[in-house]
Image (cartoon, rainbow, N blue to C red):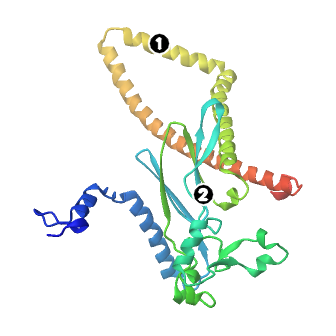
């Protein structure tokens, strides 16, 4: 037995302080299957790229952002500076862009620290001398190894692997990793849209600005859809009256007692119902196609907003940029 802070429990022979600490410590939750799958997906894509094209395209790479909707949650796996936001509709018409991801580039200080920790380069994040030509140092952009702005990416083997690198990077790799940062957000009834876009959008629009543009375009689409049936009936009042008459006749028929003729009619209705089911499936497919078109239209509204901002900044017309 020991006394003082090192005293052991007589029964178990274990340090009392250590036992208490172990009992009080919270067990770390195991990573979810979704998180593991997303990380493995990025690693697999990266490995396959290097296996197939690494030697020929060692300086080629891309940002990657993948979102998974599961059990009323959205998982986002991000490698690079693409960004995902959720468009949130609040009270009194307020619209906000809630970020799901962090831009993983040299503007993120914790990411720069991770680059420095991975590499043996004392100046792992530095300016590129060409960027300094005609610019003040404070306006220039710092880069990984003076070369790349993102700190994580698919590909770009010259900053990851010695056999795919070259001087002056080769002796200090790895600088970057493909390992994505995985985040999760629980969906709420106020969440209307999920927006995934590259830095070409986010260089010009804030999260809220993008959300407002999407919301405005979506509401305009909804108004057009609501006007469409009214326009159709106004254009063909005879068809609208016929539909109303058919509905009334059907209600009267259901109110009558069942007769042999009614049974025959019901059989015919059943066959018609089968045809209606097939028609509904076709209609559902058409609706999905329309949804795809709507998504494309909403995406285009973001591009239009970016063009408008660039044109305004450069005193140009949008048509000149298009």
Q: Residue furthest right?
A: 315
Quadrant containing the N terminus in the rendered view: bottom left
Residue 24 picture quarter: bottom left
Of residues 79 and 295, the one drawn nearer to the viewer in this rendering: 79
Residue in the image at 50% along x and 63% along y: 181
Up-down relation of residue 305 to residue 166 (above or below): above
Q: Secondary structure at mark 2?
A: strand
Q: Position of residue 243 (x, y in %)?
A: 55, 19
Relative to 84, 26 lies left or right: left
Relative to 322, 281 lies left or right: left
Relative to 231, 11 lies left or right: left
Q: CA distance from mark 2 to mark 1?
A: 56 Å
Q: Residues within 10 Å of mark 1 (few under 14, many from 20)?
A: few
Which label sits in the foreground, 2 or 1? 2
Quadrant containing the C terminus in the rendered view: bottom right
Up-down relation of residue 211 to residue 262 (above or below): below
Of residues 259 and 17, the one drawn nearer to the viewer in this rendering: 17
Q: Secondary structure at mark 1?
A: helix
Residue in the image at 68% along x and 41% along y: 217
Q: Position of residue 69 (x, y in %)?
A: 46, 50
Q: First in sequence: mark 2 or mark 1?
A: 2
Q: Disc number at residue 83?
A: 2
Residue 153 appears in the rendering: no
The residue labelled by disc 1 is 249
Of residues 154 and 278, the one drawn nearer to the viewer in this rendering: 154
Residue in the image at 17% along x and 66% along y: 8
Q: Position of residue 35 (x, y in %)?
A: 41, 60
């Amino acid at each position: 037995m020991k006394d003082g802070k090192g005293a052991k429990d007589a029964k178990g022979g274990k340090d009392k302080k250590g036992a208490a600490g172990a009992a009080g410590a919270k067990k770390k939750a195991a990573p979810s299957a979704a998180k593991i799958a997303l990380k493995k997906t990025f690693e697999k894509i990266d490995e396959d790229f290097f296996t197939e094209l690494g030697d020929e395209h060692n300086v080629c790479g891309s940002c990657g952002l993948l979102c998974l909707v599961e059990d009323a949650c959205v998982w986002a796996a991000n490698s690079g500076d693409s960004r995902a936001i959720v468009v949130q509709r609040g009270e009194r018409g307020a619209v906000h862009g809630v970020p799901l991801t962090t831009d993983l580039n040299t503007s993120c200080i914790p990411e720069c620290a991770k680059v420095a920790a991975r590499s043996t380069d004392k100046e792992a994040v530095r300016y590129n001398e060409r960027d300094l030509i005609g610019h003040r140092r404070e306006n220039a952009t710092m880069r990984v190894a003076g070369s790349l702005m993102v700190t994580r990416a698919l590909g770009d083997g010259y900053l990851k692997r010695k056999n795919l690198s070259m001087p002056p990077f080769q002796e200090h790799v790895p600088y970057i990793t493909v390992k994505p940062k995985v985040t999760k957000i629980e969906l709420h009834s106020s969440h209307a849209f999920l927006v995934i876009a590259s830095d070409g959008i986010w260089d010009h629009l804030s999260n809220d600005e993008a959300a407002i543009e999407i919301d405005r375009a979506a509401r305009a689409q909804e108004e057009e859809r609501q006007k469409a049936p009214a326009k159709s009936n106004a254009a063909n009042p005879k068809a609208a009256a016929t539909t109303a008459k058919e509905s009334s006749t059907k209600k009267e028929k259901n109110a009558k007692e069942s007769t042999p003729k009614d049974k025959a009619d019901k059989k015919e209705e059943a066959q018609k119902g089968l045809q209606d089911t097939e028609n509904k499936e076709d209609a559902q497919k058409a609706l999905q196609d329309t949804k795809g078109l709507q998504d494309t239209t909403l995406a285009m509204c973001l591009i239009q907003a970016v063009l408008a901002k660039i044109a305004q900044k450069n005193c140009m017309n949008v048509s000149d940029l298009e």
